[in-house]
Amino acid sequence: MGKALVLSLFVIAGSLIHIPKAEAARCSADGSNCTYKQRTNWYWCGLVYTPRTVRYQVPEGTAPSGGWRTAFFYNGTTPTSMNPFIKHPLLFNAFGVDNMAKILKEMLDNPSGTGHKYATFAPNPPATAVVGQFWHTNVIFPYSFSCDNSFFNDFFKEIKNGSYGSSSQYNLNKRYAFGISSGGYNSSRMAVTFNGSSVWKALGIISASYATCAGPLCSVPSLPSNHPPTKFWHGTNDFIVPMFTMEKYYDKLIASGKVAAKQIHGGGHELTPQNLGSTGIKNWFDKY
């Protein structure tokens, strides 16, 4: 009886030893919600001191040497102050919105255990209407007159100055931008206006095109010599941003000797499961 008890204890102990330790995560297992911090980033837009909401999070654990790679998510045209870190059941997955937090989970938690983790920022677009918000990259000309331009210059400085926690946790020499719709155009804007020091390493553009294009109206000029590698995700049935506008940008990148890729699906203007996993945004960023 005593020997049997001792043997049982050894078996239990051995089993416990082989249970893999669960890695701490910022997001729920199903990717429906992620924890986040929120800050109001005040900046001068002309003579007006203006607030802009920024949500952000860093991965669990100790940042690697040089800091976490840093990703910036730019949402599209949405209701005012929509939160990309949580699921919005009342939207019934319109425009594939349920995939939004799942993408952030991949960035923050690296659930596949491959590649990298990313500190992730999601600033709000400017509130342009009473109940809506969208980026002004293709609205205000010249862009230097826009509030977005003023915001980003201030925002990036505030990250460096420690307003979003110790700046040492962020590797701001390895920045990555991705977005959908107006946020996709705004991701392109990072390469056009804010890449003087070649800090943007890769872009992910969903249902959008070049920074100054808008819907079917699209002309792609000569591209910066340091334009980062860019991948596009686009639906053949996207009637808001026709696929041919994305093709113009893609073709110009290839013709200019830049790195570009595209993932075509049969849907419309939306986030899809193709933005995840082996065909997804994080997998693309991990290469660079």
Image (cartoon, helix red, strand yellow):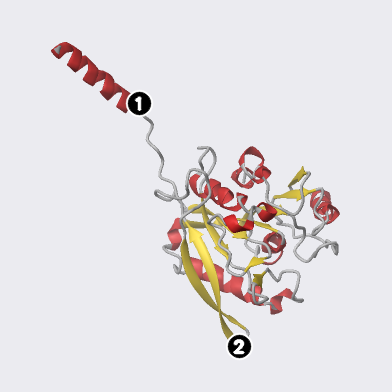
Q: Residues within 10 Å of mark 1 (few under 14, many from 20)?
A: few
Instruction: Answer left or right for 216 relative to 95.
Output: right
In x, y percent, where is residue 184? 70, 59
Q: Name the residue rendered at 78%, 44% in the picture.
A: 266
Q: Residue furthest bottom?
A: 47
**Amino acid type, label 1:** His
In x, y percent, where is residue 47? 60, 88
Q: CA distance from mark 1 to mark 2?
A: 62 Å
Q: Which labelled disc corresponds to residue 18?
A: 1
Q: Nearer the viewer, mark 1 or mark 2?
A: 1
Q: Quick one: 71 or 7, which is closer to the camera?
A: 7
Q: Residue furthest left?
A: 2
**Amino acid type, label 2:** Leu
With respect to residue 34, does 80 lie above or below?
Answer: below
Q: Do the residues under discs 1 and 2 have CB atoms within 8 angstroms?
A: no
Q: Secondary structure at mark 2?
A: loop
Q: Quick one: 88 or 255, which is closer to the camera?
A: 88
* Upstream in sequence: badge 1 or badge 2: 1
On the image, which quarter does residue 252 sit in? bottom right
Q: Secondary structure at mark 1?
A: loop
Q: Name the residue rendered at 82%, 48% in the picture.
A: 236
In x, y percent, where is residue 212? 78, 66
Residue 199 seen from this side: no
Image quarter (top left, top right, bottom left or bottom right) of the N terminus = top left
Instruction: Answer left or right for 219 relative to 4.
Output: right
Give the labeled residue for mark 2: 47
In x, y percent, where is residue 277? 61, 40
